[in-house]
Image (cartoon, helix red, strand yellow):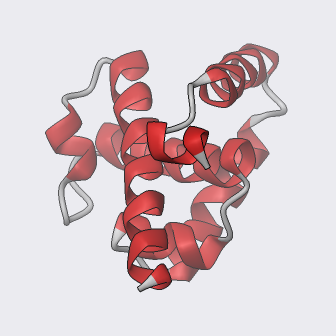
Amino acid sequence: MFRRNQRAADEARAGMVTALVAYALEIPLEEVQAPGRGTAEAAFARQVAMYLTHVALELSLARIAVAFSRDRSTVSHACHLIEDRRDDTRFDDWIARMEEAIRAAPQPVASAAA
């Protein structure tokens, strides 16, 4: 039972991050959440969302893979790509602000009550 609840919670967290990234990059959420690769812009947004889910929410790569319906190696690749882009000061500042926004998001009501 816990695993199902954990999976649902992970999917909800990933969904929140994905929605924020889609909004910030002005890409339709449906494109970012599509099962296939989609456009380069949608794939990049998904990579950013996976990276932020790992860094800001501290989920493991395996849990992120399940939450995004992707392979663990895909999540690892995304994290490496985004980390490499952090050498660009403007991108690094943007990612840092995104991390702060995600960390500042309120906990779900059920988690807050526990």
Q: Position of residue 50 (x, y in %)?
A: 53, 53
Q: Name which quarter of the figure residue 98 lies in.
A: top right
On the image, the x and y values in percent for residue 18 come to 39, 40
* Count of labels in the image: 0
Query: Which residue is at the front of the view, 4 or 14?
Result: 4
Q: Is residue 102 above or below residue 41?
A: above
In percent of the image, x 39 and y 21: which residue is there?
25
Name the side, left or right, on which 44 lies relative to 91. Answer: left
Q: Is residue 57 above or below residue 86?
A: below
Q: Is residue 79 left or right of residue 13?
A: right
Residue 27 vs 84, above or below: the answer is above
Q: Residue furthest front?
A: 113
Drawn side of residue 112 relative to residue 26, left or right: right
Q: Quadrant of the N terminus?
A: bottom left
**Relative side of 54 to 93, left or right:** left
Q: Residue at x 66, y 62 (%)?
A: 59
- Observer-nearest residue: 2 or 33? 2
Q: Position of residue 45 (x, y in %)?
A: 42, 39
Residue 42 lies in quadrant: top left
- Foreground pick, 18 / 109: 109
Residue drawn at point x = 82 percent, y = 17 percent: 89
Q: Position of residue 92 (x, y in %)?
A: 77, 24
Q: Quadrant of residue 54?
A: bottom right
Q: Residue at x 56, y 35 (%)?
A: 107
